[in-house]
Amino acid sequence: MRLPFRKLRVPRNLDDVTSTRHTCEVDPQDLGLAPDAVQRIWAGVQRYYRTGTQPLIALCLRRQGQVLIDRAIGHSHGLTYDSQRPLRRASTDDPVCIFSASKAVTAILMHRLDALNLLRLDDPVAEYIPAFGKKGKADMTIRHVLTHRSGIPSIAIDGQSLDLLADWRTIIDLLCETRPTWAPGRRLAYHAVTGGFILGEIAQRVTGRPLPELLREELAEPLGCRYLSYGVAEEHTDRVAENVFTGLPIPPPISTLVKRALGMSFRDAIDTSNQARYLTGLVPSGNVVATADDLSRFFQLLLGNGSFEGRAILQPSTVRRALTESAYYELDLTLGLPVRYGQGLMLGGPLLSLFGWDTPHAYGHYGFVTIVGWADPERELAGALLTTGKGLFGGHLLPFYAVLSEIARHCPRVRRL
């Protein structure tokens, strides 16, 4: 029996679909790496691309604050089932929706507002959104939401996904009327979508400013990012790389668990992500758009304890608080896996780290399976690996993890923590 495997055709000559910003890449030997380190890392990316599960892969690595790699391979458009766009070669300038990696960005904004004394993370949410303090939510704190312990890991939005996600007021009202599945703080369950709306509403109320404006003025512009924005302007939606379902169909009961976490099916989530209403909307947990360079700049900021290229953007204490552990290999009831969390970020570990083999002190965040932004303080490394192929099964996860492990292997430690 032949399985219905969704695989893309891979060009014979990968140079034909590769884009490199040679002018900004530093000689690896100047950064303490072997002469062939970049070649070996990129060979791992090429092996991953040859699985046929990724239309586009973009990788940007900063080592000691300098760009080691900034490359892209594949195609950004023209490979979806119903695409009306011509095939377009990938570029390092292509913006990509980073999905749940957006949570790291939104979390840092909340820590920034806490440092500015505009809110306190241990205050009840209801102090900022009075209508929220009912149906068992009176004692739910901002920190409960930030650390996936609010008891509201998801809400059902199936069948009205785009309409609801585009209606901020309605979704906030729905969250205010929702009763937690369990008492806030009692259990850990990843909040795929819900937490960002709650945090975003608080941020807008305490500042009187739209959340996209906060991100632009507090982080994106100081970092010199081209995007790093909640969605894009309507006239720029055609620039955003298209997401494509690849791999094997998702069988039950896993499909049911995915639908419960996302509020819609896996395929519907992919289709939604390509729609203009999603790309121009505001989904704080899931629709930040960035290039690989943008996201690596963000994690370089955290790696620099709040400073980027000599400019202080955040207080060092803000970064330290964001990295304070909130869960140590505790079972996440949404993911069904034991995980380590900080205060809005994912943490590496001494065993099988999320960010490659032997990266116990790394931290960052994943987005829709195979998107990741991270920093590794022992290697003085900040990186972003962006992909547009979406699948849970199909033999591509090991090559993806192998890329992260190759990066760790060929970027030796500068110090030990």
Image: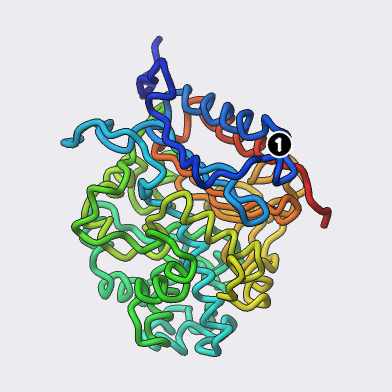
Q: In the rendered image, is residue 253 in sight? A: no
Residue closest to the far right: 416
The front one of 1 and 403 is: 403
Q: In the rendered image, is residue 43 in sight? A: yes
Residue closest to the far front: 23
Residue closest to the far top: 1
* Quadrant occupied by the C terminus: bottom right
Left or right, 238 with respect to 155, comes to left
What type is the residue that disc 1 sits on?
His
Q: Residue at x 38, y 81 (%)?
A: 204
Q: Residue at x 30, y 41 (%)?
A: 242
Give the quarter of the image for residue 80. top left
Left or right, 86 with respect to 11, comes to left
The front one of 225 and 237 is: 225
Q: Secondary structure at mark 1?
A: helix
- Picture layout, residue 241 above or below residue 43: below
- The image shows residue 315 at horizontal and vertical percentages of 63, 78
Q: Residue at x 36, y 23 (%)?
A: 8
- The image shows residue 304 at horizontal and vertical percentages of 65, 65
The front one of 308 and 360 is: 308
* Quadrant occupied by the N terminus: top left
The front one of 25 and 11 is: 25
Q: According to the image, label 1 marks what residue? A: 410
Left or right, 185 with respect to 286, comes to right
Crowd band around label 1 with a 10 angstrom C-alpha radius: few (<14), some (14–19), many (20+): some
- The image shows residue 26 at horizontal and vertical percentages of 60, 45
- Picture layout, residue 401 above or below residue 128: above
- The image shows residue 221 at horizontal and vertical percentages of 42, 69
